[in-house]
Image (tube, rainbow, N blue to C red):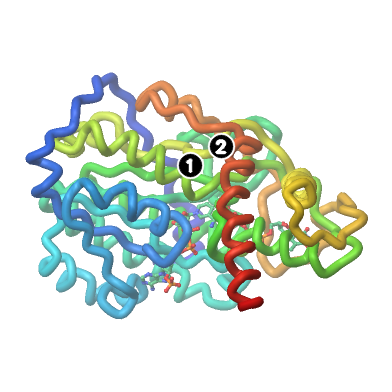
Amino acid sequence: MGYRKALALGQGCGRAAACRHQKPSILWASLMRILLTGTGGQVGGALQPLLARLGTIIAPDINEFDLSKPDRLVGGLDTFQPDLIINPAAYTAVDRAEDECELAFRINAGGPEVIAQWAAKRRVPLVHFSTDYVFDGSGKAPWREDSPTRPLSVYGASKLAGDTAICAAGGPHLIARTSWVYAAKGANFLRTIARLAAERKELRIVADQIGAPTTARTIANAIADIVLPNLSNLNELFARKGGVVNLVCVGETSWHGFASAIVTSLRSRGLPVEVERIVPIATADFPTKAKRPGNSRLDVSRLNRQFGVVTPTWQKALSLELNDFVALQHQAAQRANS
Ligand SMILES: NC(=O)C1=CN([C@@H]2O[C@H](COP(=O)(O)OP(=O)(O)OC[C@H]3O[C@@H](n4cnc5c(N)ncnc54)[C@H](OP(=O)(O)O)[C@@H]3O)[C@@H](O)[C@H]2O)C=CC1
Ligand SMILES: Cc1cn([C@H]2C[C@H](O)[C@@H](COP(=O)(O)OP(=O)(O)O[C@H]3O[C@@H](C)C(=O)[C@@H](O)[C@H]3O)O2)c(=O)[nH]c1=O
Ligand SMILES: [Mg+2]
């Protein structure tokens, strides 16, 4: 699918209906085969331990199941025979995507399309992940699941094309739309800021892009809370309540506000912090290849209403994540000294 066509497609595909959560069936759980992609990444890595007790986790690496080669995925799916597919694998290098448009589209749209069509034919439920970067960032109101999309970047357009293809496949699916994901491990803003804060006296961080930093752990917990009690009827649950659902931490801040909170917490926890000034700047003063939305706020009321899932505030989630981050830093320091 081409970039322009993708830009013109897809306005979200949320559906609404009422349903009661059911208790998990132990027998069902033990028989379940769950295909989980991207376990080397933030969200896949956080999901893996939570899902492990549900049955057999099939976690292929990129050589066994490469989303950039959509025509080879059906063979893998036929071999794995999953009862549930969870697909956090994605191309997430936002600036690089501007130069690797074709690759980003294959991984974020072509691969998911093949998976969704395979799953739809067999009525296998599919959980996928989307981004705030499908929006153009206008206005100040939080985006709802059915708000008009207009991505500003290749990454955003490729993710939207994936969402649209999954919706069009017509199978039972849930697309969790999230934002500003980070974890104690992985490539993310928390780790970038921690590194820069230990090296520099001054940080200059954009203060006019507003959203909700969200830990991979928050996303994994929410998905587990939706999936676990409904294992035996996920198919029906997603057919009635699936589609897109926003899944972010509660509250909002700018990247500058997020960086400031990270640095304050690192200092109070005794980690090395050299930085003296965190200067708020405009997006225009931090030129990047890809354009990013100014308004990345996502309205989580559907998540609360449909699934009864309440996420923590971004500040609470940050504090929890920093416990792990600090422990990992101490371990690394001990290894370096021994
Ligand atoms: N990160 C963010 O800020 C946000 C992410 N999202 C979405 O959430 C989801 C999870 O993101 P996150 O966990 O942060 O992503 P990460 O970048 O942390 O992880 C992506 C994973 O995808 C794997 N991957 C990359 N290319 C391929 C490929 N060709 N075939 C198979 N696997 C591949 C990577 O493998 P390897 O480990 O080998 O590199 C990695 O394990 C994605 O859909 C993303 O678009 C939404 C909003 C914000
Ligand atoms: C390092 C740095 C970044 N920034 C800005 C650039 C950018 O606007 C913002 C965040 O930088 P990042 O490169 O981490 O942002 P980015 O990679 O665009 O993060 C996005 O990733 C994809 C995968 C998503 O889906 C989005 O939800 C979002 O999390 O901070 C500064 O202003 N100063 C700095 O020193
Ligand atoms: Mg990034």
The mark total stands at 2
**Helix, strand or loop under label 1:** helix
Q: Residue furthest front?
A: 338
Amino acid type, mark 2: Cys
Is residue 333 in view?
Answer: yes
Name which quarter of the figure residue 108 lies in: bottom left
Q: Is residue 58 above or below residue 293?
A: below
Residue 223 in the image: x percent, y percent?
Answer: 36, 41
Q: At x 13% / y 49%, what residue is drawn?
A: 32
User: Label 1 vs label 2: CA separation?
Assistant: 7 Å
Residue 218 - label:
1
Residue 311 in the image: x percent, y percent?
Answer: 50, 32
Q: Is residue 269 above or below residue 100?
A: above
Residue 8 in the image: x percent, y percent?
Answer: 48, 53
**Helix, strand or loop under label 2:** loop
Q: Would you say 164 lies left or right of 287 here?
A: left
166 and 42: which one is in front?
Answer: 42
Residue 249 - label:
2
